[in-house]
Image (spheres, helix red, strand yellow):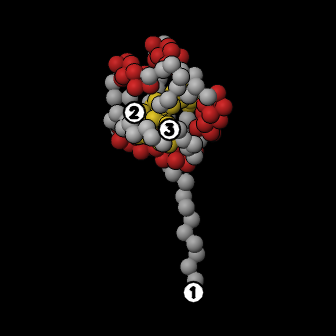
Amino acid sequence: MHDEPAKVEPPRTIPASIFFVDDDEIVREVLADELRDQGHEVEACDGAAATLALLDAGVPVDLLITDLNMPGQDEMALIHATRIRRPGLPVVLLTGDPGNLVSAPSPGLVLRKPVRTQALTRAITEVLQLAAVPPRL
């Protein structure tokens, strides 16, 4: 009698409204499309101004995913500004700088780039569960 290899189940996706912020157009669009394919509603933004404009326009959001290192921008200031508008908004920070030891504001996580879709999906689910935010979809 031999054992069948255990199947690895993909992480369960909690559909959410996501603002995805990255100054690299290719990274932003590829990851945003992959998240859309998983059932999320994604607003892809190239920086803080576009993100805050969406918030000020009342666009619903369950989660902010943002690159931590964008030229001319302080993403911790973006997180602070989003949390003024949406208190407790969960955050996933992405960073390609291995020396960057920043910790994410609660609720939140930090992921290192390049990030795989499966890791991002797990992070989204974990942060939404930590925040206990019911998705708006």
Q: Amino acid at mark 2?
A: Pro
* Mark nearer the viewer, 3 or 1: 3
Which residue lies at the image location 36% right of the left edge and 22% below the top edge?
80
Count residues near mark 1 (Cα–Cα under 10 Å), then give few for <14, some for 14-19, many for 20+: few
Residue 8 x/y as whole percent: 55, 61
Query: Do labels 2 and 3 touch, CB within 8 Å?
Result: no
Relative to 99, is 43 on the left or the right?
right
Q: Which residue is mark 3?
A: 97
Give the percent coordinates (x, y) of residue 105. Answer: 34, 33
Q: Is residue 135 visible?
A: no
Quadrant the N terminus occupies: bottom right
Does 109 appear above or below 23?
below
Q: Nearer the viewer, mark 2 or mark 3?
A: 3
Disc 1 designates what residue?
A: 1
Circle number at residue 64 = none
Label of residue 90 in the image:
2
- Say whether disc 3 or disc 1 marks the residue closer to the N-terminus: 1
- Counting residues from the start of the chain, the first of labels 1 and 2 encountered is 1
Q: Rounded to the nearest whole Å, what is the CA distance between mark 1 and mark 2?
A: 48 Å
**Residue drawn at (44%, 25%) of the image:** 75
Q: Residue at (45%, 35%) from the top-left corner?
A: 93
Q: How many marks?
A: 3
Label 3 crowd (10 A; few <14 / some 14-19 / many >=20) = few
Can you give x and y, in whole percent of width and height, for residue 69 in the image? 50, 29
